[in-house]
Amino acid sequence: MLAKRIIPCLDVDKGRVVKGINFVDIRDAGDPVELASVYDKEGADELVFLDITASHEERNIMLDVASKVAEQVFIPYTIGGGIRGVEDVRKMLATGCDKVAINTAAIKDPSIITECARKFGSQCIVVAIDAKAEGWREEGLPPRRKLAEHGGIPQRQDPEDWYQVYINGGRTPTGLDAIEWAKKVVSFGAGEILLTSMDRDGTKDGYELELTKQVTRAVNVPVIASGGAGTLEHFSEVVKESDADAVLAASLFHYGELSIRQVKEAMRDKGIAVRL
Amino acid sequence: MIAIVDYGMGNLRSVEKAFEYLGAQVKVTSNPGDILNSDAVVLPGVGAFADCMDRLISTGLDKAVAGLIEQGKPYLGICLGLQVLFEKSYEGGENAGLGLIKGEIVRLPDEVKVPHIGWNQLDVKQENPLLKGIAGNPNVYFVHSYHATSKEDVVVATTDYGTDFTSFICKENIYGVQFHPEKSGKIGLKILGNFLEIIK
């Protein structure tokens, strides 16, 4: 049986991991290579590095990071953030990484997906989608983040509600429907979707089950659920309820609140195939 | 020295880095002479079957690899490197392989998501030097759409994905794995380390 994957995500700014990381045996908590090999030893099935470096000039630092990771880490890993075109993808893959995640550039010019898939194969092209539920922001309803502070966010219920795609790190709405966009990127050649619920990200209220379910039903490529992990149960829940192929979490692992092993054991106890 | 065959199709860096990490001397090469002079050869899998065979034949690498195997030196085929050992493949039409093992390469069944990407289990059928020190049925990392169906008794392990397909073969000094040991964490490094032991 194909195992469900547990994926820690590392945000990298100018070559350094940001967001504190709480491992005991770490010499340098900002070193992406050292952290990646710790996660590898802890049993991570895959890693995602997101380059959040703001300036274009300093983006090349990530290529250097990627090369160094290739020397020490022998599990699959994806690099995303700031990928603008085919040439960026080619350079990144040449360092030894397995997949490249494209987000904003795919919206600006979807033919990039097709061109990359044709050149390098669909299996290495991940399209990242940042989605936010709209409709809960109608008059009289508080924004979803506010709802979270008052004990849980209801799942999307009203058929008039929809999920909108955002780009530029969640700053710019695109007007695109997330489910339709997911179908489109797969038809263009994306081999996997990294789906982040902006409503859930950072809330620890659990993954957005409805959004994830709608996307996994709409496409026939693996979907990585992201945003909202807070407890052991959340991981099993999103896999069982929405059929996600992989689950991603960042701060939960970085701050040592849960270990990858704990998560996997809890999933195994729920009858989910994991690599232990 | 281990020769990693470069047939110009893409990235062999992760295989090279994994062997280097284990302390092996490796040379990524497209020169048939280098291959015949090496202690062992690794053919990593990148790209499509037909392109790979075309490149191997046009560069004379097919003969070099066959010659090295004939000398009794160890061969490790990874992914496509396993598939080219067989008589033919149905990827992109019907294409002939090296024919060193009887059998053919077919597509994974339609009922499952293809390509098969991710961690899956080896159902180990028989002992093998490459699995020395590895207990039970370990999880390893796969990325492929086609798999081997062998007509010879060469199956070391199978894997369940829509069908029980051949994921590990061995015939004398020829080893072939459908998964990627260079991406299979500790287990994968152990398998590559065991390959280095054979060479010694």
Image (spheres, coloured by chain):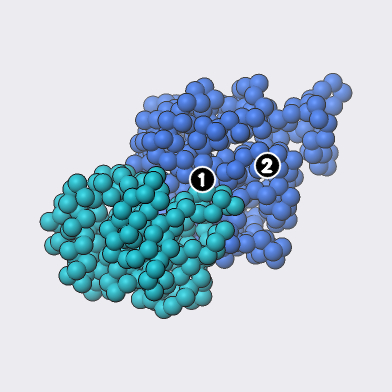
The kind of secondary structure element at disc 2 is helix
Which residue is most to the right?
A140
- Badge 1 and badge 2 both on one subunit: yes
Q: Is residue A200 visible?
A: no
Q: Which chain is cyan?
A: B
Q: Which chain is blue?
A: A
**Horizontally, is A270 left or right of B155 in the view?**
right
| Tag 2: amino acid | Arg
Residue A54 or A6: which is nearer the viewer? A6
Rendered location of residue A167, percent (x, y): 58, 26
Labels 1 and 2: the sequence-earlier one: 1
Q: Is residue A154 above or below residue B160?
A: above
The residue beneath circle 2 is A217
Q: Residues within 10 Å of mark 2 (few under 14, many from 20)?
A: some
Residue at (66, 33) in percent of width and height: A179
In the image, A180 versus B54, the foreground residue is B54
Q: Which residue is denoted by mark 1 in the rendering?
A: A48
Locate the N terminus of chain B and report the quarter of the image it occupies: bottom left
Disc 1 from disc 2: Cα separation = 24 Å
* Amino acid at circle 1: Val
Residue at point 31%, 44% (across, down): B51
Judge whether B151 appears above or below B32 on screen: below
Where's residue B7, x and y in %?
A: 25, 48
Please, is residue A221 above or below residue B14 in the view?
above
The residue under the point 17% across, 52% down is: B60
